[in-house]
Image (tube, coloured by chain):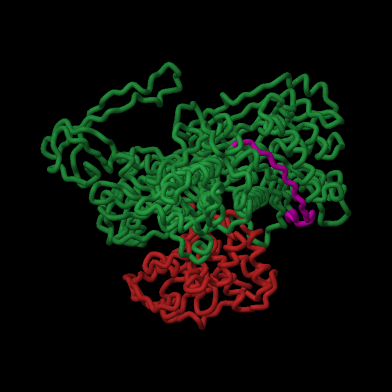
Amino acid sequence: MAEGWPKKRRLLGTRVRRLDGPDKATGRAKYSFDINRKGMLHGAILRSPYAHAKIKSIDTTEAKKTPGLKALLIIGVARNGTITAIDGNTLTYKVATAAPKKKGPKKDEKPEEKKEETFNVEVTPGVTLISKNKVVKLSDLKVGDPVTIESEQAAVGRELFFAGDEIAAVAADTEEHAKDALKAIKIEYDPLDHFVHEDEVIKNPRKKTTPGPLQGNLDDTGKEFTKGDVAAGFDKSDATVEGTYGVPVISHQCLESHGLVAEWDQDGGLTVWCSTQATVSIAGALAGRFGIPPTKVKCITHYMGGGFGSKFSPGVWGFTAADLARRAGAPVKIMLDREEEITTAGNRPSASGTVKIAGNKDGTITAFAVDCRGTPGFAGGATVNLNLLPYIYLDAIPNIKRSHSVVLINAGQAQAMRAPGHPQNCVLTEFAVDDLAAKLGIDPLIIRRKNLPPNTKTKDAISWAARRNNVYNEQLDIATKLAGWQQKWHPPGMGKAGTVKHGIGMAIHTWGGFAAGGNTPNECHVIISRDGTATAQTSTQDLGTAQRTVTAIVVAEILGLTPTDVVTKIGESPFGFSSGSGGSTTCPSQAPAALLAAQAARDDLFKKVAPKVGADPTDLVIEVGKVVDAKNKKEWAWKEFCARLGMDEAKGKGEWSLAISNEPGNENISSGQVGGVQIAEVLVDSETGVVRAKHLVAVQDCGLVVNKLACESQVAGGVIMGLNYALFEEIIRDQQTGRQVNPDMEFYKLGGLADMPKITVHMMDMPERGVIGIGEPPTISTAAAVGNAVFNALGVRVPFIPLTPKRVLDALKKGGKA
Amino acid sequence: MKDSQGDPRGGVSRRGFLTGTGAAAAVAGLTGELAPPAPAQVNPASAPGAGPGAVRLELTVNGKPVNTSVEPRVTLLDALRNYLDVTGCKRVCDRGTCGACTVVLNGRTVYSCTMLALEARGADVKTAESLGMGRLDPVPAAFAENDAQQCGFCTPGFVVSMRAAFDKNPNATPEQIEAALCGNICRCGTYEQMRNAVVQLCRKGG
């Protein structure tokens, strides 16, 4: 059993300024985008202008003559093989291939079965040969050599599935020259039919314009869920409402776009400065791709400009930059431009559907049925996560039914985005709950209290499950008080007369926030030097969550120092294992790892120095700035004590994971499951349709708060992202051209300072539950709360977000009380 | 993608937009309280006739005279970042919307992505780095103290805009400072903390 968090907290839970604040604010902090290496080239990618097309012809002859060009590659056609014969200019090679999977989703097929195929290629100027990560000539090769063959003409016939799909890439001495080279690549396309709207796919469900085993673009299988008897639940209720609600596809809009700088060294090692939320897995992915040991790849992410779930993989651009760098023998930078960022680097899937909900006058919900769909772009995947269920009310509602379709369209692929699936789910569920409350003629607060999940008696008393009902009720108490709910709520549409309507609405959410799962625990290393310096080292990355500062706070707390005394080295993959920053797992993994590392380093220090000062290590304790021998009433200043290390240093390693947190006695160190309640107050101009948020209240529990300042900032930031979702953000695509019409920051709207309401954040500190992640939960329920506030203002539901003036006016035309 | 061939949308590229409308477009990138263009501060003779090859560029950046050679199509932002390794100004939207590239040029804030580098020949340019040289300027200090930043990629742009607003009017009210920040966007959502920083700075007169 671990020692755990100190009973008396000196720094933990206080407001600590982030250590790198001044560096970031004055531009000194170097992000991946800011890395300029000596001799560095700029890469650029040629992309499909069509939503769906085949490459008819490709010719790079002219491009290769453009000034400053150093490398050119064709994407998606390289083959790794072994040479079986060389005859003049003709190379014969064999390739190990998996059995083809594309012939249909036959479950009894074994795609793992490997077979070999032999190919001949005439080595012309359009063919690139790579061996041992260097471009080679045919004369450099012999039979039996492994080789990568990239034939330009192999791109002919390649199918492109969205506007932005990658075709070729170049590296040149300047960005301007790289763009010139791209323009000089001659490509002809055969445009094919495309769908960029879900409605078009629904009309033509069996027409196929996307890759994969489906017969068409619609996957309507495998997402059914049933609990109880829904028909009976509807029959036995006092009221039933049915509504169609929806949320759009939105973009992560990371301000630092995706990308990296890649540099190969003389020994065949690769260093990348990558804007990522997963340094270790980036290094692993690149090592795998280029056939080198993971220890020879170093991923550096000292600072990164936002990820929100979209930056776990090197991406086509990252692999391409590293590939161009090996070919050019020089560092290459590829950072996506804004249009590329929005169209190709990920998005949050849409969701829309019909929700039928029934309940009784006392507020009990008797049945909930949802039939919905969403699109992740041209390919599905685990990141879609559209498990549209009424999460909060899952236990309370006796009868639930869900059907769900995934709609593939010719658009860039989704990536995880801050609480994948939950914001969509929250809008669809909470809109329906408020519509039911209105039909029943009751306060939405009553229906929520009535359907909260019950406490589970069998669980450990401090766990979420054992007390969630109490926590939610307390959060509702706090939130309604902070928002003035009792004074401000009125039946929908029944506020004061006037053009500008006042409304107030609420929504609630849940999230995990446990330590990271997986077999390898997160690591942190602490070293105490003889000059008293404590260095904390971890490969984890700081996405803006102040993770660097979290590490320093924890180490300083244990060693009696101040956070600025701790040298924190983070964001380099060789610094030990860390998991990707997803699922709000970073703080609950890394804070305990830092705790254990600091405690182990302290114990090592005591063990090494105690004999030199005539003390027993077990009598020693650390107080602020000093080491105290409580038994013998002696004390040493911290630096004086550390100086006795002599030539030695004290070291400690900490490891933490979900499995370790689940060991008995560790439940106070980190745990998971949180709840939150948000209340929005809005003003809606019924003549112009403009919605203005006036006040947003967020009440959030998150176990042991490490840094209150950063924690509150994280919650307020989540709320603002939710407000943007509610009012402004939407990827808009044109079916005619197949292109996104707003791949920018002008017509893809994000709120500015003038759009922001007052935000009140209340953290429920529950230190006995240990550290729980906070990155995702506060963004889940904001849009639902804002939408419900607009409903409360107008007395008519605006069913689709963002709640633009047009949508508001359209809803009012259909029967509002304007 | 904006430069790709066969663009069925026939989109307007930023370069095309810039080079097509010249200096008027460049000064339209002025931020702040809807300040009118200040053509006298830009050398109008610098753009016509130059190029297409690289042209010598001399200017003062954060008090230091610097020079390089850039093609006429290179923006001030790209010249600073790619040719002079001054990276406090960030490239985000690259078309005058988000404010991350904001710099002070001859005393006025400009979006450096919407101005050609050659139009800034001989100019005095200040980036966020100028506020961290020696003593930390009160504006970035207030951002750090109030935690008015998360990922921090937008922060230098906000800091430069705010510093310029206080320089213009040390007695500015929080409302006036907020108005001066309307040309900047933060994705992490640190506006609440920024407001705290603004209020604190207004009390101290910037």
The segment highlighted magenta reads: A671-695
In percent of width and height, residue A502 lies at 81, 53
Q: Indicate left or right for A787 with A660 as reference.
A: right
* Display colour for chain A: green
Question: Along the horizontal axis of the image, is B68 left or right of A90?
Answer: right
| Depth order, front residue of A558/B144 | A558
Q: Residue furthest left?
A: A88
Spot the red chain and give its letter: B
Percent position of residue A33, x then y: 43, 57
Residue B57 on the magenta segment: no
Could you tell me what secondary structure mostly forms the magenta stretch? strand
Q: Quadrant of residue B48?
A: bottom left
Specify the quadrant of the image occupied by residue A30: bottom left
Q: Quadrant of residue B64?
A: bottom left
Residue A485 visible from this viewpoint: yes
Front one among A339 and A521: A521
- In the rendered image, which quarter contains the C terminus of chain B? bottom right
Give the percent coordinates (x, y) of residue B88.
47, 65
